[in-house]
Amino acid sequence: MKPVVRNRKGELAGQAETLTTGEMARLSNNTLRTVRFYEEAGILAPIGRTEGGHRVFERHQLERLTLVTDMREAGLSLDEIRKLLETKETARTGGAAAETAIQVLRKHITDLKAKIEVLGRLSQDLEETVHAAEACLGCKDASFPAQCGTCGRVGKTEAQPRAMRVLWSLNGKAQAEQPANGGSTAVNGANRK
């Protein structure tokens, strides 16, 4: 049974479509603290409180919270999100609101696509590094780490992923050093740039 909810004027609020702060947090995979933070920041607006003093939100606020959560996870600042959410209220016409929203959204889409490209490249590099590092699982060499790359476990592959080269310093030197032969370095018989 849903608790009795009163809005800010003390009137009974519709209860079928209301969610408590705890329900908002649980359904959006957020913490109570995060829901309260967005309320204090003006991103979420409770419609009232239960007789016990718990804040309640209309169900559409959950969709707003999940969108905001995704945008924050994607790297948008709270100010950027707030401006986007206020686009409709601050524009003089629907056309002006749409124009502003489209411009802002296109910029974010471009930024997200660039991040997706970097994340995809990094993910592949890290996956290849995990595979390459698996060859070291049985390493019991007492000369570790000085002899990494010369033991034959990882050195036999034609080209190691960047993260493996950096993390394992396969050439026995810090990877930041630039070789004198035009930028390529021989690591276990394979030339790398």
Image (cartoon, rainbow, N blue to C red):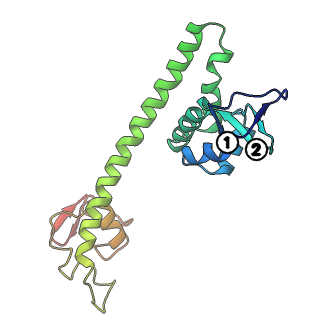
Mark identifier at residue 20: 1
Q: Position of residue 27 (x, y in %)?
A: 55, 44
**SS for callout 2:** loop
Q: Earlier in the sequence, mark 1 or mark 2?
A: 1
Mark identifier at residue 54: 2
Mark 2 neighbour class, 10 Å CA radius: few under 14, some 14 to 19, many 20 or more: some
Vertical arrangement, residue 163 with respect to residue 73, above or below: below
User: Is residue 100 found left or right of 40 in the rendered image?
Assistant: left
Marks 1,2: beta carbons within 8 A:
yes
Q: Which residue appears at 33% of the width and 47% of the height?
A: 120
Q: Position of residue 85 (x, y in %)?
A: 62, 26
The amino acid at mark 2 is His
**Residue found farthest to the front:** 1
User: Is residue 9 found left or right of 83 in the rendered image?
Assistant: right
Measure the alpha-carbon separation of dots 1 and 2.
7 Å
**SS for callout 1:** strand
